[in-house]
C-alpha cells in the first residue's frame, strides 16, 4: 500500500477486501459519485477507502429517457439505465483524473452478455490505476443483463467465473436484493471464485402520479435507495456475512456514521455510501470522521475488532 | 461554491460544503408563491444569473433531497450576503419550505450550474417569463442594469401567469426592464392570452444580429417558443427545470435530450451541462 499524506491516515481503520488493502472501509457506491470529479471540490479524495465508479459497459450507453428519478418516503427511485461513457473512454478520459490521488479505484462493470462482461474486465485489467472490479449483476433498470444474471445462482456463478478468468484483480460481485434468498446467490459466487461480495443494490419499486395516472418514472419501475431500505440491507448483510467466508461490503441507505457502524457490527468488512452523497456531498468524509471518533470513544484499537461483533438477541 | 470551484484541485485549501444559514425572511407574495431571503456568510461565492442552489431544511430527513431553486437576487452587505429565492409550492419539498419560520435553519449548496451569457454587443435582451420562471430572469435583468450605461442593453420582459393573483416579481422587473408586458390566461391583467402570442406579434421587429431572448417557464411555453423560433434566427437561451438528486452532475437524474449529429440525440444534465440551454438544441418530443 502506498503511503498517504501526513495527517490524513487513521491506521486503525485499515481493512483487507479479498486482497485489496484499503486505508479505511468507506467507499463510494457505484453511480452515486460519478468518476470522482464532481466531488473532488467537496472531499479530499485521498482520504477515502476506495472509489467505485459509475458502471462501465463495453460501449457507451445513453441511459433511459427522463424522468429518471423520483423522491419517495425516506428514499428515492432511480432508473438511470446505466448511462456511461464506455470502458475505453473511461480509461482515456476519466481514469487519469483519478490516478492523481492516493485512492484505490474499483471499476464497476456491466454486460448484456457473458462475453461483454469478460471483454470489459479484460480491458480494465490492462489499465493502469484500476485496483479491483465490482461486477454488477444486479441492475434493475435495463432490459438485458444486470439482474437477469444476479437473480439466478448458476448464472451469477457463471458471470463470476468469466470475469475471474479474465483478470488478476480482486473481483467483488454486487448482489441484488430482489431475490428470495440473497445468501444462496452469495454462496454461489463465492464458490465461483469471487473475492468479496457487496450488497445490496437497489430494491425494485414504483410510484404513480395519480392526477395524470402515469408512472413518475418513464421506465415505470426503478431502484429504491436511501434510508428507506437500510433495515432490509442490514438484515441481508447480516445473513450473508454468516454464510460466506469472503468479505462482505455493506450498502443500503447509509446516511451517517451510526448507520455505517450498524453494518460493520452486523459483519460488513467495508461499506459503501450512495444516496447520502446526493443529500450531502461531504457525506463520505463526515462518515469517515464519525467512524474514527467512534473507535476512539470506545477505545477500539482496530476496526477489525468491531466487525461482526453483534451480540445479544435470540432468534425465535 | 460556484462553477470555478468544481475545477479547483485539492491542494490543501478548504473543501466546499453546503452552507448552513438562517432564513431571514420567508414571505408569501401571492397564493402559493414565496420569497425566501437567506443570510449567507461573507465567504460565499457570488452567484451569476441563471445559476441555482440546492436548498434543504436543516436536520430534516423527509424530504430527503435538496430542491433546486434559481437565484432570484443576491446582495453583499458589510458582514455577509443575502440570497433570495422565489419559489412556488409544487410538492412536499416546497411545501416544507413555505412553512419555515424566519430564523429557521437551512442548508444551501451552490451556486451551481451555468449562467445566461449576454455578449457585449447585444443591444436588446428579451425576457420571456412564465409563472415562477420569472425568478432567474429577474436576477438577469438586475445584472444587466448594473452594466455601464453605454453598454447597458434595452431589456423587454414578457411575463405570463394564470391570473393577476399569480403575477409575481413585477416590482423588480419594472425597476430593471425598459418595458414589461403582462399577459394572463384569464385576462385579469394585461393581455388576455398566452405570453407567446404577445411575443409572436413582436417577433418581426427583432433584429437577430443584436438581440437575444432568455426564457424560463413551463414546458408548454418553451415548446411553443421553439415553434416560433423555427422561422426566426434570433438566439434564445432557456433555463430548464428537472427533478434532481445531487445538483452536481453525479446522479444523472436530471437528463434532457438534446440534438446530436446525424439527427440523433444525447442526454445532457440540467444541473451541470445546464440549466441554461440553447432552445434550438433541445428535443421536445422523443
Image (spheres, helix red, strand yellow):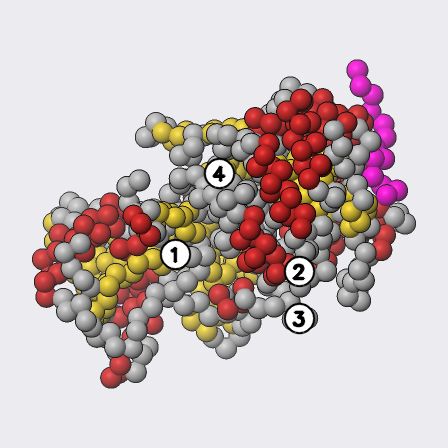
Residue B191 lies left or right of residue A164; in this view the side is left
Residue B176 visible from this viewpoint: yes
Residue B155 occupies which quadrant of the picture?
Answer: bottom left
Which residues make up the magenta segment? Answer: A304-316
Instruction: Determine the CA span between mark 2 and mark 3.
Output: 15 Å
Which residue does the numbered mark 4 point to in the structure image?
Answer: A81
Circle 1 residue = B275
For the N terminus of chain A, the image quarter is bottom right
Dot 4: chain letter: A
Label 2: chain?
A
Q: Are marks 4 and 2 on the same chain?
A: yes
Q: Around disc 1, counting alpha carbons within 10 Å, would you say few (fewer than 14), some (14 to 19), or many (20 or more)?
A: many
Q: Secondary structure at mark 4?
A: loop
Which is closer to the viewer, label 3 or label 4?
4
Residue that mark 3 sits on:
B11
- Label 1 to label 3: alpha-carbon separation: 29 Å
Rendered location of residue A68, percent (x, y): 44, 39
Amino acid at each position: 500500500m502506498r503511503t498517504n499524506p501526513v495527517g490524513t491516515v487513521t491506521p486503525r481503520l485499515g481493512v483487507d477486501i479479498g486482497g485489496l488493502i484499503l486505508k479505511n472501509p468507506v467507499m463510494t457506491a457505484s453511480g452515486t459519485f460519478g468518476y470522482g470529479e464532481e466531488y473532488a471540490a467537496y472531499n479530499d479524495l485521498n482520504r477515502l477507502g476506495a472509489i467505485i465508479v459509475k458502471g462501465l459497459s463495453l460501449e457507451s450507453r445513453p441511459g433511459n429517457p427522463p424522468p429518471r428519478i423520483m423522491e419517495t418516503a425516506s428514499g428515492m427511485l432511480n432508473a438511470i439505465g446505466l448511462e456511461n461513457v464506455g470502458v475505453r473512454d473511461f480509461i482515456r478520459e476519466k481514469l487519469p483524473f483519478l490516478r492523481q490521488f492516493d485512492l484505490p479505484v474499483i471499476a464497476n462493470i456491466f454486460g448484456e452478455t457473458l462475453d461483454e462482461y469478460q471483454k470489459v474486465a479484460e480491458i480494465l485489467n490492462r489499465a493502469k490505476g484500476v485496483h479491483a472490479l465490482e461486477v454488477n449483476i444486479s441492475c434493475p433498470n435495463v432490459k438485458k443483463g444486470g439482474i437477469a444474471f444476479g437473480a439466478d445462482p448458476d448464472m451469477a456463478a457463471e458471470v463470476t467465473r468469466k470475469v475471474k478468468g479474465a483478470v488478476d484483480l480482486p473481483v467483488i460481485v454486487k448482489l441484488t436484493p430482489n431475490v428470495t434468498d440473497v445468501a444462496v446467490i452469495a454462496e454461489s459466487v463465492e464458490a465461483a471464485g469471487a473475492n468479496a461480495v457487496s450488497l445490496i443494490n437497489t430494491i425494485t419499486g414504483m410510484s404513480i402520479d395519480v392526477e395524470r395516472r402515469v408512472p413518475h418514472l418513464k421506465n415505470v419501475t426503478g431502484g429504491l435507495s436511501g434510508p428507506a431500505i437500510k433495515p432490509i440491507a442490514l438484515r441481508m448483510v447480516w445473513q450473508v456475512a454468516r454464510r460466506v467466508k469472503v468479505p462482505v461490503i455493506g450498502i443500503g441507505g447509509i446516511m451517517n456514521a451510526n448507520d455505517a457502524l450498524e453494518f460493520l457490527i452486523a459483519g460488513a468488512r467495508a461499506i459503501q455510501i450512495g444516496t447520502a452523497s446526493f443529500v450531502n456531498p461531504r457525506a463520505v468524509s463526515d462518515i469517515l470522521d464519525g467512524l474514527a471518533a467512534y473507535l476512539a470513544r470506545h477505545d477500539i484499537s482496530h476496526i477489525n475488532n468491531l466487525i461482526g461483533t453483534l451480540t445479544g438477541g435470540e432468534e425465535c | 461554491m460556484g462553477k470555478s470551484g468544481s475545477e479547483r484541485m485539492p491542494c490543501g485549501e478548504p473543501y466546499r460544503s453546503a452552507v448552513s444559514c438562517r432564513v431571514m425572511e420567508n414571505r408569501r407574495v401571492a397564493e402559493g408563491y414565496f420569497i425566501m431571503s437567506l443570510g449567507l456568510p461573507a465567504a460565499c461565492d457570488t452567484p451569476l444569473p441563471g445559476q441555482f442552489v440546492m436548498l434543504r431544511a436543516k436536520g430534516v430527513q423527509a424530504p430527503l433531497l435538496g430542491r433546486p431553486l434559481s437565484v432570484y437576487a443576491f446582495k453583499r452587505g458589510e458582514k455577509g450576503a443575502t440570497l433570495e429565492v422565489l419559489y412556488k409550492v409544487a410538492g412536499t419539498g416546497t411545501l416544507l419550505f413555505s412553512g419555515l419560520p424566519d430564523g429557521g435553519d437551512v442548508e444551501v449548496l451552490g451556486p451551481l450550474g451555468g449562467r445566461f451569457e449576454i455578449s457585449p454587443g447585444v443591444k436588446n435582451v428579451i425576457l420571456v417569463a412564465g409563472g415562477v420562471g420569472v425568478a432567474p430572469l429577474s436576477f438577469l435583468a438586475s445584472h444587466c442594469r448594473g452594466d455601464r450605461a453605454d453598454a447597458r442593453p434595452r431589456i423587454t420582459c414578457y411575463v405570463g401567469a394564470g391570473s393577476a393573483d399569480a403575477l409575481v416579481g413585477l416590482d423588480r422587473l419594472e425597476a430593471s426592464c425598459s418595458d414589461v408586458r403582462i399577459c394572463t390566461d384569464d385576462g385579469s391583467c394585461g393581455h388576455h392570452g398566452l405570453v407567446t402570442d404577445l411575443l409572436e406579434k413582436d417577433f418581426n421587429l427583432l433584429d437577430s444580429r443584436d438581440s437575444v431572448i432568455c426564457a424560463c417557464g413551463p414546458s408548454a411555453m418553451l415548446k411553443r417558443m421553439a415553434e416560433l423560433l423555427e422561422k426566426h434566427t434570433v438566439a434564445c437561451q432557456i433555463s430548464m427545470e428537472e427533478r434532481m438528486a445531487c445538483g452536481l452532475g453525479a446522479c444523472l437524474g436530471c437528463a434532457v435530450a438534446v440534438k446530436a449529429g446525424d439527427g440523433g440525440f444525447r442526454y445532457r444534465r440540467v444541473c451541470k451541462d445546464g440549466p441554461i440551454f440553447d432552445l434550438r438544441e433541445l428535443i421536445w418530443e422523443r
